[in-house]
Amino acid sequence: MRVSSISLRDFRNYAEADITIEQGCVVLVGSNGQGKTNLIEAINFLATLGSHRSSTESAMIRTGEDAAIIRVHLAHDDRQILLEAQLNREGPNKAQFNRSTARLRDFPRYIATVLFAPEDLLLIRGDPASRRRFLDELIVTRTPRLSSILSDYERALKQRNTLLKTARFSEASVGKLSTLDIWDDRLATLGSEIMVERQRLVRDLAGPVAAAYESIAGADHHPELLMKESVLLPLGDSTIDQTTQAFLAVLNSNRATEVERGMTLYGPHRDDVEFSLNSLPTKGYASHGETWSFALSLRLGAARLLRAESVLGDPILILDDVFAELDASRRERLASAVSDFEQIFITAAVVEDVPAALLQHVFRVERGTIARALK
Amino acid sequence: MYEGIVQELIDELGRLPGIGPKSAQRIAFHILQTESFDVSRLASVLVEVREKVRFCEICGNVTQEVTCSICRDPRRDATSICVVEEAKDVVAIERTREFKGFYHVLGGAISPIDGIGPDNLRIRQLMTRLADNTVQEVIIATDPNLEGEATATYLTRLLSSLEIKVTRLASGLPVGGDLEYADEVTLGRAFEGRRTVS
């Protein structure tokens, strides 16, 4: 799959921008604050319905305007798809699929992206929440149904935590506690689906990440991924049913502690995934270079997994300001590792940062205008 | 901002569910400007509705009498009760004309965030209605969302001690729709609840 044209109206700092794009590698060059990242943010928004920079959608609408429009033509083999999204400052957003009304939340079915950004270092060094987000985003791309499971789990967790807090203070806690069983049940049913999907993802990601690491670091340091769950599961593959039972048993035997603390202490919201190189955890042991190599391999491994599984074909790779962070040899190796993807978007402050092999279609971005750079 | 009472009217209208500031303004000006609009009639209905309407002593549905017209109807099937969250769900099911039994309106769903537990719902009244063994089937028709499912689970466990058949409304594909446009969750549920046809 690839983007064949983008047009923006009142999106971030773009009043109006229209560009047509060929297959291969698209490089956006410009100083800071000119709008390079804004352009790829627009593409990424259609695929993830979110922004990697801000949590509010209204930040994407140009100052002083009521609505922003993103219009993207996609080419998938011979099929042409037109996705249009209108973000409104007031009222719900609107979406069109091939000129007929559609739901914005269905767009990720038609476009998949994998974004590399300097913030990816947090996948290794940051808190568990950033690693859970990495896993959950991929889970939703692989199995769209999980998106509603994840949001229901969040809500069930809030409901249960509220109940635990009130159970702690209320006199009649015995009567109230019986409904805790019901929320245990909801939490375990929803949570075990997430846990099983994460297990499956981590298992399937191991091979692609190891291969990606070797191609980026130029050496085999035996990278490994291991789920660290708060609910201990028996070794090997667990079915959803077995996981639910294990989850319920843990909640049951720790109820007194949870009531006392007034919060849910077990479940996928407390889980983590541990990364290791040569059997040592990356957190605390890996060098800066190794950390970068691992972070990049997670993204590249994810891209290769999606390529192998998705009916959409290759995901669109987006490398946002990544090359400036890497040394020369990692740059070259990353460049050759991604070169076989159908389409890649790269942003860079200076064109010298980008390996020559990737300089296929260069655009200059300046104060909200995009122009093709002369060779 | 409008002056005095006009703004007050817009604010009051805006407090109603489903009415935003723009709709509130439109309704307010409709009331002010349309000559044929009979304000006193609307005002009296509003007052009357609060005075006269109450909740059926048996099922909790809205009514102007002690019991609602469904509970008073002798032609209905006394062996089954359909449990719903709100009175408006009764109207929705009545429109289908498929169900001939009685209803029981809970008045909401279990939701600790909103401070609603089983004691705040009309569950005790339901248990009383089931005590005399007339009812043979309880159909749970709470909403198919997180809170509705939690309420359904609660009721199922509560009723499991009684010798009564408990059923839950099926989830699945909308009739007349296209399979390809169904979202993953609905389609997944439809698969789960598939039926043998031969």
Image (cartoon, helix red, strand yellow):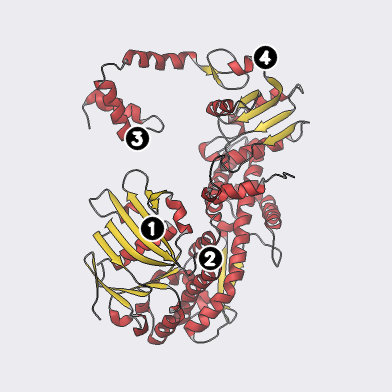
Disc 4 to disc 1, C-alpha distance: 59 Å
Q: Is residue A309 above or below residue B127?
A: below
Q: Specify the quadrant that holds the N terminus of chain A.
A: bottom left
Residue at (52, 87) in percent of width and height: A219
Q: Amino acid at mark 4?
A: Pro
| Pointers 4 and 2 in contact (C-beta within 8 Å) | no
**Sequence-first tag of 4 and 3:** 3
Circle 2 is placed at which residue position?
A310
Q: Amino acid at mark 3?
A: Gly
Of badges 3 and 2, nearer the viewer stands: 2
Q: Nearer the viewer, residue A108 or A41?
A: A108
Which labelled disc corresponds to residue B74? 4
The secondary element bearing badge 1 is classed as strand
The chain holding disc 2 is A
Q: Amino acid at mark 2?
A: Ser
User: Residue A372: horizontal and vertical position, in percent?
Assistant: 25, 73
Which labelled disc corresponds to residue A82? 1
Say few, some or many: other residues with alpha carbon within 10 Å of mark 1 (under 14 / 14 to 19 / 20 or more).
Answer: some
- The image shows a total of numbered marks equal to 4
Q: Is residue A12 visible?
A: yes
The chain holding disc 4 is B
Q: Amino acid at mark 1?
A: Leu
| Pointers 4 and 3 in contact (C-beta within 8 Å) | no
Say few, some or many: other residues with alpha carbon within 10 Å of mark 2 (under 14 / 14 to 19 / 20 or more).
Answer: some
